[in-house]
Image (tube, rainbow, N blue to C red):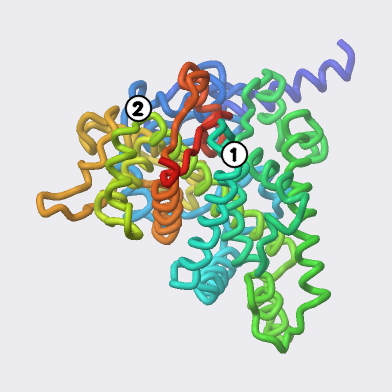
């Protein structure tokens, strides 16, 4: 036998041994499909993976686990599991997933993919900076109200003809974020910004929908392959291209600010606050200013748009679509808001129910266990990637009776007051609820929203979940008819 053949056989045997050893299930793991060397559990699950995750409550119950791409993955399928993981045992479930994208493309940077002490410093700084610039305060309400009027003008220009909601809604919401991050309405001032919004949308919508077996094998071997080789494969290469285009745009905004901003001046936006903080800590120890790297600023700007634009704009698109399909409910809401900003209980209940019924981030933002943990009596090993099946929580009849029915009144008590449920886990919570409220009220005050027959006939296609991070409605058109034209 040739020496090379012997070497390959021995290498394959050793790899199989160590892979099998790694996959050997510790005792008391949650239930789930089997796992075998190289392929993990991929032979037993369906792709896109996030679509399959939504089916796991019926297959495995409150918690399940499987192995994919050399990683152990855990799915939390109930409110009790989510609460125990992220409230009771938050210190063990607070990590972010680590993979080639987060390390080589994102550089373990930013607000959504960062981890550790540097991330905590960045998060603390960012929350304070956004508060300083009026996020959630009256100044922010004025910005949202202004953008709502701009949105109404844009929709009015359609003259009652069918029009897509994607671009105008994205522009309106992104201008609110632009005011905080850039200090200007970049969405209207930069002709290329629409393209950048499209790229950000692709980041949240793209999934490995046509997953090839070669990708499964390659990802299982990724520890033994160069990152450059893995990232040169078609799907990873596509994602890297999108990320780099977004980061180049962010860097252009940073460069313009650095050229014009005087650190002696009071910061007017997030980028200027970042530059001012970097200047203030010039002589500080490295660990005190590690979060102020240029990469962190690039990725954080991108994160703020992903978290603040794509999610809110798509929530608003679902709301407009639902109103178009339910004219009686639309008229009921219009009667509440006809002559005032809005009767908060019924309008807030409607938005709360829309966030439940149209779960925007069905499988949540993936986390990682930073230590061995116990969850609902099961053992969860360190470095397990954790998904929250938020759609399962929102569809659980023990939480919400008759969950397939859209019923805002479930959040109105006997005294007529709005009673939110802690079991609603939307991606956009808190201050962003105010943003949705103001945009939704403005739309209902200004328009009767309708849907063409051609779109009514393809609702299944519009509502279908593609397996991306964000569940956005598919391309469609609505009709916006001014109420004062009646």
Label 1 neighbourhood size at 10 Å, few (<14), some (14-19), many (20+)?
some
Label 2 neighbourhood size at 10 Å, few (<14), some (14-19), many (20+)?
some
Q: What label does residue 327 carry, if any?
A: none
Asked if one can make out residue 212 in the rendered structure from this viewpoint, the answer is: yes
Residue 281 image-quadrant placement: bottom right
Above or below, 185 against 27 in this view is below
Residue 294, percent from left and from top? 75, 66
Residue 144, percent from left and from top? 50, 61
At 51% from the left and 32% from the top, the residue drawn is 478
Q: What label does residue 57 carry, if any?
A: 2
List the residue tagged with mark 1. 158
User: In the rendered view, does 308 fall on the left or right side of 329?
Assistant: right
| Quarter the N terminus occupies | top right
At 53% from the left and 23% from the top, the residue drawn is 41
Which residue reaches farthest left? 414
At 34% from the left and 55% from the top, the residue drawn is 87
> CB of mark 2 within 8 Å of CB of mark 1?
no
- Quick one: SS at disc 1? loop
Residue 409, percent from left and from top? 21, 42
Residue 315, percent from left and from top? 46, 43
User: In the rendered view, does 53 fall on the left or right side of 397?
Assistant: right
Above or below, 39 against 419 in this view is above
Label 2 vs label 1, nearer the camera: 1
Which residue reaches farthest top? 1
Observer-nearest of 130 and 207: 130
Between disc 2 and disc 1, whose residue precedes? 2
Observer-nearest of 199 and 215: 199
């Amino acid at each position: 036998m040739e020496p090379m053949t012997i070497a390959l056989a021995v290498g394959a045997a050793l790899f199989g041994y160590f892979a099998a050893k790694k996959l050997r299930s510790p005792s008391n793991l949650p239930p789930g499909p089997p796992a075998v060397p190289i392929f993990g559990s991929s032979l037993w699950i369906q792709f896109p993976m996030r679509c399959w995750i939504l089916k796991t409550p019926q297959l495995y119950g409150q918690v399940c686990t499987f192995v994919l791409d050399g990683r152990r993955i855990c799915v939390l399928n109930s409110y009790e599991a989510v609460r125990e993981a992220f409230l009771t045992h938050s210190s063990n479930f607070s990590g972010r997933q680590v993979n080639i994208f987060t390390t080589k493309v994102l550089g373990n940077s930013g607000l959504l993919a960062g981890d550790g002490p540097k991330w905590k410093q960045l998060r603390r700084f960012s929350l304070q900076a956004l508060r300083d610039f009026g996020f959630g305060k009256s100044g922010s309400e004025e910005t949202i109200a202004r953008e709502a009027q701009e949105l109404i003008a844009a929709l009015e220009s359609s003259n009652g003809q069918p029009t897509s909601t994607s671009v105008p809604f994205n522009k309106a919401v992104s201008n609110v974020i632009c005011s905080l991050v850039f200090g200007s309405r970049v969405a209207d001032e930069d002709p290329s910004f629409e393209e950048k919004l499209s790229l950000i949308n692709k980041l949240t919508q793209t999934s490995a929908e046509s997953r090839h077996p070669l990708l499964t094998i390659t990802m299982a071997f990724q520890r033994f392959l160069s990152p450059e080789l893995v990232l040169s494969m078609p799907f990873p290469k596509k994602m890297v291209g999108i990320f780099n285009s977004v980061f180049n745009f962010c860097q252009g905004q940073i460069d313009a600010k650095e050229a014009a901003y005087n650190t002696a001046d009071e910061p007017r936006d997030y980028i200027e606050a970042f530059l001012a903080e970097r200047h203030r800590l010039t002589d500080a120890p490295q660990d005190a200013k590690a979060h102020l790297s240029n990469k962190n600023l690039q990725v954080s700007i991108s994160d703020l748009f992903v978290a603040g634009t794509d999610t809110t704009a798509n929530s608003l698109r679902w709301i407009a679509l639902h109103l178009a399909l339910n004219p009686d409910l639309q008229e009921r809401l219009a009667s509440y808001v006809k002559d005032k900003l809005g009767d908060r209980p019924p309008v807030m209940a409607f938005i709360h129910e829309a966030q439940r019924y149209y779960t925007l981030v069905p499988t949540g933002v993936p986390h990682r266990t930073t230590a061995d943990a116990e969850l609902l009596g099961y053992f969860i090993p360190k470095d397990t990637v954790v998904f929250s099946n938020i759609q399962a929580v929102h569809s659980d009849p023990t939480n919400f009776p008759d969950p397939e029915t859209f019923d805002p009144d479930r959040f109105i008590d006997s005294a007529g007051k709005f009673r939110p449920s802690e079991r609603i886990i939307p991606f956009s919570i808190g201050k962003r609820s105010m943003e949705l409220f103001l945009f939704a009220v403005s739309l209902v005050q200004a328009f009767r929203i309708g849907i063409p027959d051609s779109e009514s006939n393809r609702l299944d296609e519009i509502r279908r979940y593609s397996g991306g991070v964000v569940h956005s409605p598919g391309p469609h058109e609505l009709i916006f008819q001014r109420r004062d034209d009646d």
